[in-house]
């Protein structure tokens, strides 16, 4: 499977998006992902970029332990609420899964 690619600019934005999502995750279960939505949208509204980051988190959910699945749920909700492209996310998660099992 071919790696879903982003442009250099999109990769930089994806890194900033992931940093916001990681902060939400670090806040734990008390955090409301919706509170981070304006900050996330200020960084990007590009569904491809958001979907690429969502794909990373989907892969972590599938490849990780059950306890990690619960910990990643706010990240998934936040990225979906921001408008992440689900097809892009599925492609990225599948590519990552194929890379780790090969």
Image (tube, rainbow, N blue to C red):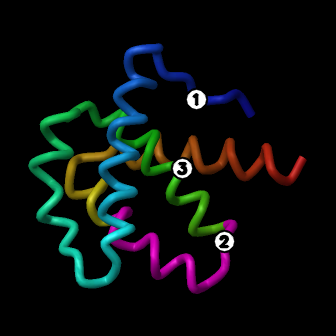
Task: Characterize the local packing of mark 2: few (<14), some (14-19) or many (20 or more) Cα atoms within 10 angstroms.
Answer: few
Lateral position of residue 31 relative to residue 25, left or right? left
Mark sitting on residue 99: none
Q: Which residue is mark 3?
A: 56
In the image shown, does 14 or 50 lie closer to the viewer? 14
* Residue at image point 81% right, 50% down: 100
Q: Position of residue 12 (x, y in %)?
A: 41, 24
> Which of pointers 1 and 2 indicates the residue nearer the eye?
2
* Residue at image point 55% right, 23% down: 5
Q: Position of residue 52 (x, y in %)?
A: 46, 39
Residue at disc 2, secondary structure: loop
Task: Characterize the local packing of mark 3: few (<14), some (14-19) or many (20 or more) Cα atoms within 10 angstroms.
Answer: many
Q: Position of residue 78 (x, y in %)?
A: 26, 60
Magenta segment: 63-76
Mark sitting on residue 64: 2
Residue at disc 3, secondary structure: helix
């Amino acid at each position: 499977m071919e790696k879903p690619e982003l442009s250099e600019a999109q990769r930089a934005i994806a890194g900033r998006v992931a940093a916001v999502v990681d902060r939400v995750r670090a806040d734990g279960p008390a955090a409301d992902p919706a509170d981070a939505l304006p900050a996330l949208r200020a960084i990007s509204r590009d569904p491809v970029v958001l979907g690429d980051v969502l794909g990373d988190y989907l892969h972590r959910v599938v490849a990780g332990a059950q306890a990690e699945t619960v910990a990643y749920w706010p990240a998934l909700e936040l990225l979906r609420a921001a408008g992440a492209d689900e097809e892009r996310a599925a492609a990225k998660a599948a590519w990552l899964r194929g890379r780790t099992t090969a």
